[in-house]
Image (cartoon, helix red, strand yellow):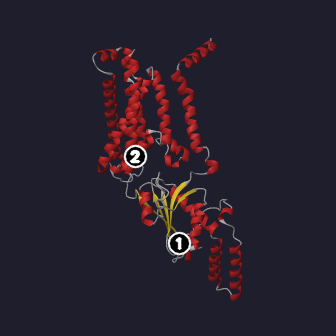
């Protein structure tokens, strides 16, 4: 009897495609996504950190430090803006970053960190103790990425030790002389000769060992300064509000669009179509309802964030309303498409759960995209979540004007139109039923 019950249970599961998907395919999909995100961290470390480097010193010492940073596997160093896509070969090469343009680039989200080497750094770059005459390297950070600045600061200390061993020897000699009361002329001559010979035998940076050199010991003076979000009370609230909000909007739109399936099963859809209501009009009405419902959800969520978590909503209302309208329209069209593809409510529930949770994991609703590998970041751009989060981040975090939202708005609105047209194409089956 027990065997019969077990056998009947597996037969029922095999016939239930929705249950089969939720039982086996969804766990495998999530395991694969998070395996790609986290699986390589043990061997490759954290994802590469993009950093803008400005060398205001232009000395041989600072140039060696810049080359060392460029050879560091953990960093993706840029000293000048990338050329615009499609630019002609005869166009002038973009000028190198300076302190002002690098700070602007960080504020615009080009990179989470900028490193500024000040003039005079090469004259006294290293100190083994308190020193008031050494120049301070500035690290400008976007505090929405709390990891990047710490990685860059640690890598800078490492690069200085591996790129400037002769300078460290010189500074060590200086401190030894101060501690011992002075070196004799012969001792100074011997040390200088050895350092000169050491410099002549130094390998190029390509030949140096890239092994870890221990913890940062503070040989270089570094000052970290927030240039984005330094005055915001709740830095990441807008990020989580957008990420969680879009994920649940997708579920809501899927459920609201599923009313088409209920009406088709009950016969109400046939009666509406026979009453001179076209399928296009019906889908447009459903789309409008889903869009308004999704917009209302986002408004309530952000109002709650403003009331409880001090989200600065009311000073960003124009950008918020534009992003909310575009996001709601896109997810509503997505809900219409899922409803037109599914045959039953159970099938819709299974398919929508698999797709929405996968989109949310890849698109940044569950895990910040800036901590993902580059491949996953690019895949995330195929989801509404990534574009919506980027747009809300521009509004609430970077305080950018509406004109800077054009890429996000174009993708959300454009994809919404395309998905609605595809949904209308698949909805013809109800007209001919």
Answer left or right for 192 relative to 94: right
**Callout 2 touching callout 1 (CB < 8 Å):** no
Whether residue 370 appears in this view of the structure is yes
Q: Looking at the image, which is closer to me, 31 or 121? A: 121
Above or below: residue 96 compared with residue 168 = above
Q: Would you identify the image quadrant in which residue 413 lies?
A: top left
Tell me the residue that label 2 is attached to. 407
Residue lying farthest to the top in this orientation:
1
Q: Earlier in the sequence, mark 2 or mark 1?
A: 1
Q: Which mark is residue 58?
A: 1
Q: Nearer the viewer, residue 426 or 236?
A: 426
Task: From the viewer's side, name the closer residue of 307 and 90.
Answer: 90
Q: Secondary structure at mark 1?
A: loop
Q: Is 156 situated left or right of 195 in this image?
A: left
Q: Secondary structure at mark 2?
A: helix
Q: Can you say whether 3 is above or below 72 in the image?
A: above
Measuring 58% from the left and 44% from the top, which residue is drawn there? Answer: 38
Place of residue 248 in the rendered image (x, y in percent of width and height, measured from the top left): 41, 35
CA gap between label 2 and label 1 equals 37 Å
Looking at the rendered image, the quarter that the C terminus falls into is: top left
């Amino acid at each position: 009897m027990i065997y019969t019950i077990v056998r009947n249970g597996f037969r029922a599961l095999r016939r239930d495609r929705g249950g089969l998907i939720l039982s086996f395919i969804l766990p495998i999909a999530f395991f694969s996504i998070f395996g790609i995100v986290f699986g390589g961290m043990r061997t490759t470390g954290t994802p590469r950190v993009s950093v803008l480097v400005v060398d205001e010193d232009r000395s041989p010492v600072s140039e060696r430090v810049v080359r060392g940073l460029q050879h560091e596997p953990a960093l993706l160093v840029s000293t000048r803006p990338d050329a615009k896509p499609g630019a002609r070969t005869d166009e002038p090469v973009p000028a190198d970053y300076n302190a002002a343009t690098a700070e602007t680039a960080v504020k615009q989200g080009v990179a989470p960190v900028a490193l500024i080497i000040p003039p005079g750094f090469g004259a006294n770059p290293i100190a083994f103790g308190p020193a008031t005459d050494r120049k301070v390297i500035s690290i400008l950070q976007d505090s929405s990425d709390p990891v990047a600045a710490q990685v860059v600061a640690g890598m800078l200390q490492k690069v200085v030790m591996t790129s400037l061993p002769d300078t460290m020897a010189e500074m060590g000699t200086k401190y030894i002389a101060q501690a011992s009361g002075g070196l004799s002329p012969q001792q100074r001559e011997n040390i200088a000769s050895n350092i000169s010979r050491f410099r002549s035998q130094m390998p190029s940076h390509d030949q140096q060992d890239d092994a870890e050199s221990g913890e940062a010991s503070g040989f270089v003076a570094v000052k970290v300064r927030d240039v984005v979000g330094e005055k915001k009370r709740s830095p990441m609230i807008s990020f989580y509000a957008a990420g969680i909000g879009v994920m649940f909007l997708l579920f809501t739109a899927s459920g609201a669009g599923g009313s088409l399936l209920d009406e088709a099963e009950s016969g109400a859809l046939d009666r509406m179509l026979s009453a001179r209501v076209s399928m296009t009009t019906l889908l447009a009405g459903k789309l409008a309802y889903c869009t308004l419902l999704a917009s209302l959800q986002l408004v309530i969520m952000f109002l709650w964030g403003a009331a409880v978590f001090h989200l600065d909503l009311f000073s960003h209302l124009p950008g918020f309303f534009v992003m909310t309208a575009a996001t709601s329209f896109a997810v509503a069209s997505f809900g219409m498409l899922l409803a037109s593809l599914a045959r039953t409510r159970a099938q819709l529930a299974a398919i929508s759960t698999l797709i929405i949770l996968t989109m949310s994991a890849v698109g940044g609703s569950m895990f910040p995209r800036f901590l993902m590998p580059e491949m996953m970041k690019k895949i995330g751009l195929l989801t509404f979540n990534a574009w919506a989060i980027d747009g809300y981040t521009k509004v609430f975090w970077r305080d950018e004007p509406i004109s800077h939202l054009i890429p996000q708005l174009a993708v959300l609105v454009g994809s919404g139109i395309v998905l609605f047209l595809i949904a209308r194409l698949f909805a013809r089956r109800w007209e001919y039923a």
